[in-house]
Image: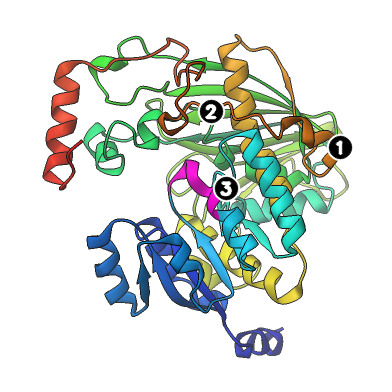
């Protein structure tokens, strides 16, 4: 095993360019440990771009089209949440491999076009969802594959990440910033992805109820609802409950019930990073020598030191690692375009359902052109950039108007950061 690791590291690095000088900065810093060589970075924020480019010693670009002409093998997209698919399609058509942060697409039409672009390019596409790669998530996947739980019947995933309003405003500059506009269902992949990867299942239908706060306009510049509960019917008949996004009470947690027991991450400090897990079997259903309950801290299956140095509980190392492996092997990664688009479509269909008081919506089969083609012109989206007369609101309460006091405070804070609307 040690010889194989050394041989892999002696291979020629994959030359990669990163779009996004903020989140992309942390991804770029860990590129070398996964077998990449950072060669270029692209962003429209000129001051930060210059500073990061100098720090990392790479070429900088403010125009994406010129960036694509740089001599490189692959592109990592760490730009705004709702802008990934158009950039990915252009990069794929330019003959470059692509790793995209969540979300893969903001509309079903973008999802269809992205799948088509990957197919016609023959290039690797990696959905950079990092939460399946914590030590706890990888251990639960190992246990599930070994039959510890039997067949999954029900699972729960939570990604609920509140923060102080000033900290949130510092990450969401301007009222049209996606963080101020995003419906709570759209950021579902951190809660859903580990469950899908552990059980190797895909969603077939989605329904959802949103959670509104009638006093929000007095407290936050955000005009979208703070939370939602999504129910996904999976292709093996199981039901997954997905909860988030920023209701008070931080919670990143996963639980699975199977035909013979349950396993879950243990709530408490560190539960999403190194994290402990709990595995339980009913007394009457234990196998010989099997404990009724055990709780322990798992480690990474390999590359533990590299993973511990990376962000998101090691996930930032593993997404880079699997992207490089896909490029070198010529085989698509497990988190391929179809899983990435399906996970993202759960958020889209979830919001459609929430606005219809919870009615279910069928998940398209994005692998099948004859089925996905029906959604090729579905541009339904709640973001301001997609403004149209029939654009859906990002809240079940309609168009929220933050109070004058809240807006004045936000704009003063943004002005201090060098931004004026």
**Which residue is disc 1 drawn over?**
370
For the residues labelled 3 and 1, say whether their Cβ atoms are less than 8 Å apart: no
Q: Quadrant of residue 242?
A: top right
Camera-side residue of 288 and 193: 193
Which secondary structure lies at badge 3? Answer: helix
Q: Identify the magenta region.
A: 80-87
Q: CA distance from mark 2 to mark 1?
A: 23 Å
Q: Is residue 382 left or right of residue 362?
A: left
- Residue occupying image coordinates x 16% and y 17%: 404
- Estimate how packed mark 1 is, as few (under 14), some (14 to 19) or many (20 or more) residues with alpha carbons within 10 Å: few
Main secondary structure along the magenta-highlighted residues: helix
User: Is residue 85 on the magenta stretch?
Assistant: yes
Camera-side residue of 215 and 141: 215
Vertical placement of residue 378 versus 208, above or below:
below
**Which residue is disc 2 drawn over?**
381
Which disc is residue 85 wearing?
A: 3
- Can you see residue 134? no
Q: Quadrant of residue 257?
A: top right
Vertical placement of residue 309 versus 147, above or below:
below
The quarter of the image holding the C terminus is: top left
- Estimate how packed mark 2 is, as few (under 14), some (14 to 19) or many (20 or more) residues with alpha carbons within 10 Å: many
Camera-side residue of 248 and 351: 351
Q: Residue 144 location in percent, x, y?
A: 78, 48
User: Is residue 19 on the magenta stretch?
Assistant: no
Q: Quadrant of residue 355?
A: top right
- Residue occupying image coordinates x 34% and y 76%: 56
- Residue occupying image coordinates x 28% and y 75%: 55
């Amino acid at each position: 095993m040690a010889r194989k690791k050394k041989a892999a590291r002696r291979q020629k690095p994959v030359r990669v360019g990163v779009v996004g000088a903020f989140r992309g900065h942390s991804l770029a810093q860990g590129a070398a440990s996964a077998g990449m060589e950072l060669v270029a970075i692209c962003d429209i924020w000129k001051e930060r771009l210059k500073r990061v480019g100098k720090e990392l010693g790479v070429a900088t670009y403010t125009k994406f089209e010129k960036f694509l002409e740089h001599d490189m093998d692959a592109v990592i997209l760490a730009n705004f949440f709702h802008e990934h698919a158009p950039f990915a399609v252009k990069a794929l058509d330019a003959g470059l491999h692509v790793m995209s942060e969540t979300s893969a697409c903001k509309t079903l039409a973008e999802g269809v076009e992205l799948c088509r672009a990957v197919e016609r390019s023959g290039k690797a596409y990696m959905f950079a969802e990092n939460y399946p790669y914590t030590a706890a998530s990888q251990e639960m996947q190992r246990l599930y594959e070994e039959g510890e739980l039997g067949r999954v019947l029900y699972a729960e995933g939570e990604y609920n990440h509140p923060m102080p309003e000033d900290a949130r405003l510092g990450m969401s500059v301007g009222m049209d910033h996606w963080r101020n506009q995003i419906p709570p269902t759209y950021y579902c992949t951190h809660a859903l992805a580990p469950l899908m990867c552990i059980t190797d299942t895909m969603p077939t239908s989605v329904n959802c109820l949103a959670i509104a706060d009638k006093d929000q306009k007095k407290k936050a510049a955000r005009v979208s609802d703070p939370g939602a509960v999504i129910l996904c019917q999976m292709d093996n008949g199981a039901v997954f409950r997905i909860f988030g996004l920023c209701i008070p009470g931080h919670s990143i947690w996963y639980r699975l019930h199977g035909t013979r027991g349950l396993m879950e991450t243990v709530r408490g400090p560190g539960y999403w990073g190194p994290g402990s897990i709990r595995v339980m079997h009913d007394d009457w259903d234990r196998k010989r020598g099997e404990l009724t309950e055990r709780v322990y801290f798992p480690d990474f299956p390999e590359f533990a030191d590299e993973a511990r140095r990376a962000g998101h509980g090691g996930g930032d190392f593993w997404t880079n690692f699997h992207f490089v492996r896909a490029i070198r092997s010529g085989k698509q990664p497990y988190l391929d375009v179809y899983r990435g688009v399906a996970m993202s479509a759960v958020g889209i269909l979830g919001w459609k359902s929430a606005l219809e008081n919870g009615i279910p919506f069928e998940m398209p089969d994005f692998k099948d052109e004859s089925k996905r083609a029906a959604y090729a012109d579905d541009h339904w989206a709640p973001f301001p950039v997609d403004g149209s007369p029939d654009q859906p609101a990002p809240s079940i309460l309609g168009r929220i108007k933050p109070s004058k006091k809240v807006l004045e405070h936000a704009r003063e804070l943004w002005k201090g950061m060098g931004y004026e609307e």
